[in-house]
Amino acid sequence: MKIAEALIRKSALQTDLSSLVSRIKRNLVVQEGESPQEDSKRLIEEFIGKYQELEGLIRRIQNANATSLLADEEDEPMEATIQDALIKTDNLYKMSEILRNIAGEAVPNVRYSQSEIKLIPTVDSTALLKRADEFAKEARELDILIQKTNWMVDI
């Protein structure tokens, strides 16, 4: 199984687990004299089994991410692991978002009259937005390499 397939399976398991929790909760208590639509004990056992499967899958994905090198555009291994690239991508997206927020705050409010105090920005919000765009672009490009590598690496 490739990492990408494992990630798809992980998502499906998480959806199944959420559904199982809802089904269990709906069948925990019934009116006296009635019977539940589904057997809560069986659902709980199914939940435990799927949760254990999810745990094993996550462990395998993380181990592969920690030990597999990222592939470049020519499918050649790079010096960074997939895990390194995931951390870098996450940080780039966060920096981009924070810089966008800062740039938005650097735009002064409109004055309503000449007697109000004039506020001027201390940073160039356009430059900050450009820098945020650069970080976001770098993150997207790195994310493409991660996705590509995920379809190449077995777990």
Image: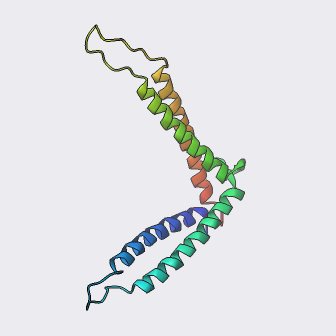
As drawn, which residue projects farthest toward the right? 79
Q: Where does the image place residue 62, in percent across and percent down from the top left?
A: 64, 61
Left or right, 97 with respect to 141, comes to left
Q: Image quadrant of residue 141?
A: top right
Counting from the top left corner in percent of width and height, residue 127 is at 50, 23
In x, y percent, where is residue 7? 54, 63
Please tell me whether residue 146 is drawn above or below residue 111 in the rendered image. Answer: below
Identify the image quadrant of the N terminus.
Answer: bottom right
146 in relation to 122, above or below: below
Instruction: Specify the quadrant that holds the C terminus.
Output: bottom right
The image's colouring method is rainbow
**Residue 9 visible, this angle:** yes
**Residue at left 46%, top 23%?**
125
- Residue drawn at x 26%, y 85% as measured from the top left: 31
**With 122 as the anchor, is 151 left or right in this view?**
right
Q: Residue at x 52, y 38 (%)?
A: 136
The number of numbered badges drawn on the structure is: 0
Residue 12 in the image: state x and y as whole percent: 47, 68
Residue 26 falls left or right of residue 152? left
Residue sitting at the far front: 32
Residue 75 in sight in this render: no
- Residue that sits furthest to the bottom in the current view: 33
**Above or below: residue 97 compared with residue 86:** above
Please identify the quarter of the rendering in which residue 153 is found.
bottom right
Residue displayed at 32% across by 86% down: 36
